Amino acid sequence: MIESIEEPIEVLVRFDRGRMTPFRFRWNQSVFRIEKVTGMWEDREGSFRRCHFSVLTENNDYFELRFHTGDLGWILSKTSVDA
């Protein structure tokens, strides 16, 4: 089941040829290594872009991360973690 989280997180990204790709993030005192980015899309909030990433971790857990170009902050938007 997908759960809405909407909490600030720390994210490490790679920049390559104008593309930003997250590869690790920290949430709830845990570090998650991103194994695969399964989707990327953008939308707008006023005059600012928001970049969304759907990712799978090493344990095959699903997360949606969001980067806001206005405050340069990251949010963990949603998750679906196997118990």
Image (cartoon, rainbow, N blue to C red):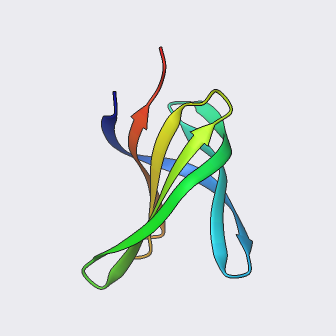
Number of marks drawn:
0
Q: Is residue 58 left or right of residue 2?
A: right
Q: Nearer the viewer, residue 39 or 77?
A: 39
- Residue plotted at (71% across, 72% down): 15
Q: Quadrant of the N terminus?
A: top left
Q: Is residue 53 left or right of residue 46?
A: right
- Residue plotted at (47% across, 26% down): 81
Q: Nearer the viewer, residue 34 or 30?
A: 34
Above or below 81: residue 70: below
Farthest-out residue, left: 46
- Residue plotted at (48% across, 41% down): 63
Q: Position of residue 18 (x, y in %)?
A: 67, 81
**Snapshot quadrant of residue 22:** bottom right
Above or below 81: residue 22: below
**Snapshot quadrant of residue 5:** top left
Q: Position of residue 36 (x, y in %)?
A: 65, 47
Q: Nearer the viewer, residue 47 or 64?
A: 64
Farthest-out residue, front: 38
**Snapshot quadrant of residue 31:** top right
Q: Position of residue 13 (x, y in %)?
A: 67, 60
Above or below 25: residue 47: below
Q: Position of residue 19 (x, y in %)?
A: 65, 75
- Residue plotted at (45% across, 48% down): 64
Above or below 2: residue 19: below
Q: Is residue 68 left or right of residue 18?
A: left
Farthest-out residue, top: 83
